[in-house]
Amino acid sequence: MSYDSVEVLATFHAAEDLRYPLLRDVDTRHFSAYGVLNPEYPPGHAGHGIALPGALFVTPDGTVQLKFAVPGYRERPAMEEIYSALTLWLSVQAD
């Protein structure tokens, strides 16, 4: 999910030949609801609307089951951590 314009997202989507949709958060409504809006940039700041880097796992019914978000932009959640948590969550659901 991004705060970027539709045009920017469409260009990136085409350039990367993605096979999934990119989501756009207008007015930071979703970033705020998910608790991932970067507090470093208050309303009025040029960076307002940037989310914390991370990943969300959302089930088809719209429930956020797993959330990984870290402050700053230089660090990202480790893919191994995300994969392990998702694998565990899926195994519990299968039981």
Image (cartoon, grey):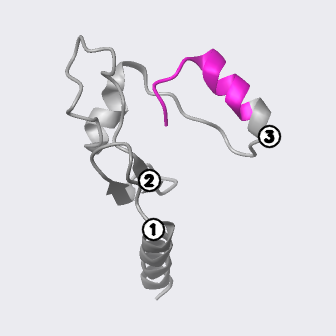
Q: Which residue is mark 3?
A: 17
Q: Is residue 62 left or right of residue 7?
A: left
Q: Contact (CB < 8 A) between labels 2 and 1?
A: yes
* Residue 33 among those drawn in magenta: no
Circle 1: residue type: Ile
Which residue is found at the position 52% from the left and 54% from the top? Answer: 60
* Residue 7 among those drawn in magenta: yes
**Residue 12 versus residue 35 in the image, above or below:** above
Q: Residues within 10 Å of mark 3 (few under 14, many from 20)?
A: few
Q: Which residues are magenta?
A: 1-13
Q: Earlier in the sequence, mark 2 or mark 1?
A: 2
Which residue is found at the position 69% from the left and 30% from the top? Answer: 12
Circle 3: residue type: Asp
Residue 46 sits in which quadrant? top left
Q: Which residue is mark 1?
A: 82
**Residue 84 versus residue 34 in the image, above or below:** below
Q: How many labels sit on residues?
A: 3
The tag on residue 64 is none
Q: Which residue is mark 2?
A: 55
